[in-house]
Amino acid sequence: QKEVEQDPGPLSVPEGAIVSLNCTYSNSAFQYFMWYRQYSRKGPELLMYTYSSGNKEDGRFTAQVDKSSKYISLFIRDSQPSDSATYLCAIHQGGSEKLVFGKGTKLTVNP
Amino acid sequence: NAGVTQTPKFQVLKTGQSMTLQCAQDMNHNSMYWYRQDPGMGLRLIYYSASEGTTDKGEVPNGYNVSRLNKREFSLRLESAAPSQTSVYFCASRLAKGEQYFGPGTRLTVT
């Protein structure tokens, strides 16, 4: 079983839609959870960072962590064409040097 | 504050040639990383350095060498390039918690 599973999509939605992006993980020792956004031909950009179960909100973005189900989500409200990018989840185990990345979900928001 | 910078942005090599990819960060981060990103494969860790003077292998180290020149700089060397090393290379750095900050990437083609 892979450490992190992420549906690669692609996902195509109309402008204004609510987008849900998800990852599952297998190691209950993982403590820190991140979402990165990567525009085409650019480096990944840290979007959200959280370390506890529950929700964390930042503008139109909400990161949700359910440690009991080993499931993390990123919600985008009122999606915009500028949100079109690949979104990668990343998970970290405290004390480790490494991040474990999902393979990314490609999102297109159509005007 | 430039964050993580990488040079060059693009490079074309012939099989068997060597080159060094340069990375520098100005955030006073302890840990630095080199990844490659290929379609369908996601981000794969090549090497990392937890602190100045130390380096460790990641998931795909074969064919690469690294040098942590000082706290700011971490270089990746291809001694004898192969077509399988055609990829986009990202450098990243991390302070204390899990989150990593990425550079803009180097697009390498080996013919």
Image: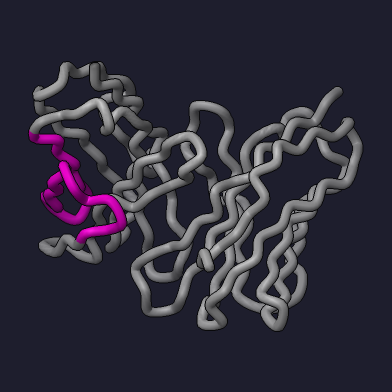
Q: Can I make out residue A59 in this image?
A: no
Question: Across the whole image, how many numbered discs are drawn on residues?
Answer: 0
Vertical position of residue B57 compared to residue A19: above or below: below
Vertical position of residue B91 compared to residue A32: above or below: above
Residue at x 74% of width, y 67% of height: A64
Location of residue B7 by image quarter: top left
Residue at x 30% of width, y 25% of height: B108
Q: Where is residue B32 in the image (x, y as percent from the top left)?
A: 29, 55
Apparent side of residue A14 relative to residue A63 in the rendered image (left or right): right
Q: Position of residue A103 (x, y in %)?
A: 54, 48
Q: Nearer the viewer, residue A26 or B18?
A: A26
Location of residue A38 by image quarter: top right
Query: What's drawn in magenta, residue-wise?
Result: B57-79
Q: Which of B41 and A74 is in front in this view?
A: B41
Residue at x 80% of width, y 48% of height: A76
Q: Is residue B77 magenta?
A: yes
Q: Is residue B69 magenta?
A: yes
Q: Position of residue B93 (x, y in %)?
A: 35, 54
Residue at x 15% of width, y 33% of height: B20
Q: Position of residue B37 (x, y in %)?
A: 41, 39
